Image (cartoon, helix red, strand yellow):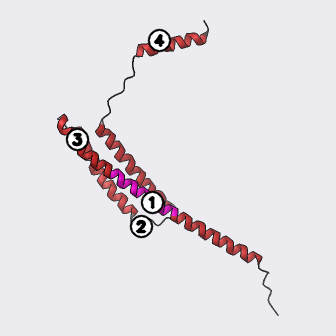
């Protein structure tokens, strides 16, 4: 029996001793809190990236701030629901808050799309301007040099 066979045998025995993998139960309210936080962070990042890229974002920054306030309120409500001792009340509250969380995530996704569109428009505009400038320079190079008549 070689060293590799001994290692495989020991690993098999260790897996048997460990038993089935234990996975903690998923807390739906905690999952909702994490999803709301992630979608809001992504929306704020998208707006920030569009602004940093020089895109004309208009009121997207104020919309991101509004969604941040709504997200904070939703997170507070979800935290309160997690602490609810009555399971039936917690489940009812979780269902109602889940609908609000889905709507918040949808609004964050819409904001991200708008920020990406603004970035794409400004990027295309810059590309068009650069190609126009290049064409102008190229045309200027083709002209014969101007010689004063005297």
Name the foreground residue: 26 vs 150.
Answer: 26
Q: Is mark 4 on a helix, strand or loop?
A: helix
In whole angstroms, how far apart are the C-alphas of marks 2 and 3? Answer: 36 Å
Q: In terms of sequence position, does the residue under pointer 2 or pointer 3 come before the other?
A: 2
Image location of residue 2, percent across then percent down: 61, 8
Label 2 with label 3: CB-CB less than 8 Å = no
Q: Mark 4 points at which residue?
A: 13
Q: Residue at x 35, y 58 (%)?
A: 65
Label 3 with label 1: CB-CB less than 8 Å = no
Residue 115 is tagged as 1
Q: What stretch is highlighted in magenta?
A: 104-120
Q: Residue at x 34, y 47 (%)?
A: 36
Q: Magenta stretch mostly in which secondary structure?
A: helix
In the image, is residue 92 above or below residue 123? above
In whole angstroms, how far apart are the C-alphas of marks 2 and 1? Answer: 10 Å
Q: Is mark 2 on a helix, strand or loop?
A: loop
- Quarter residue 149 falls in: bottom right
């Amino acid at each position: 029996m070689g060293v590799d066979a001994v290692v495989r045998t020991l690993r098999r025995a260790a897996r048997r001793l460990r038993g089935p993998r234990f996975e903690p139960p998923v807390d739906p309210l905690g999952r909702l809190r994490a999803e709301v936080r992630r979608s809001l962070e992504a929306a704020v990042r998208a707006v920030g990236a569009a602004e940093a890229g020089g895109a004309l974002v208009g009121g997207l920054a104020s919309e991101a701030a509004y969604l941040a306030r709504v997200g904070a309120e939703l997170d507070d409500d979800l935290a309160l629901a997690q602490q609810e001792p009555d399971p039936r009340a917690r489940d009812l509250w979780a269902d109602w808050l889940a609908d609000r969380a889905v709507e918040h995530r949808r609004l964050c996704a819409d904001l991200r799309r708008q920020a990406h569109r603004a970035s794409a428009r400004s990027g295309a505009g810059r590309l068009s301007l650069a190609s126009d400038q290049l064409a102008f320079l190229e045309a200027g190079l083709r002209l014969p040099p101007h010689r004063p008549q005297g």
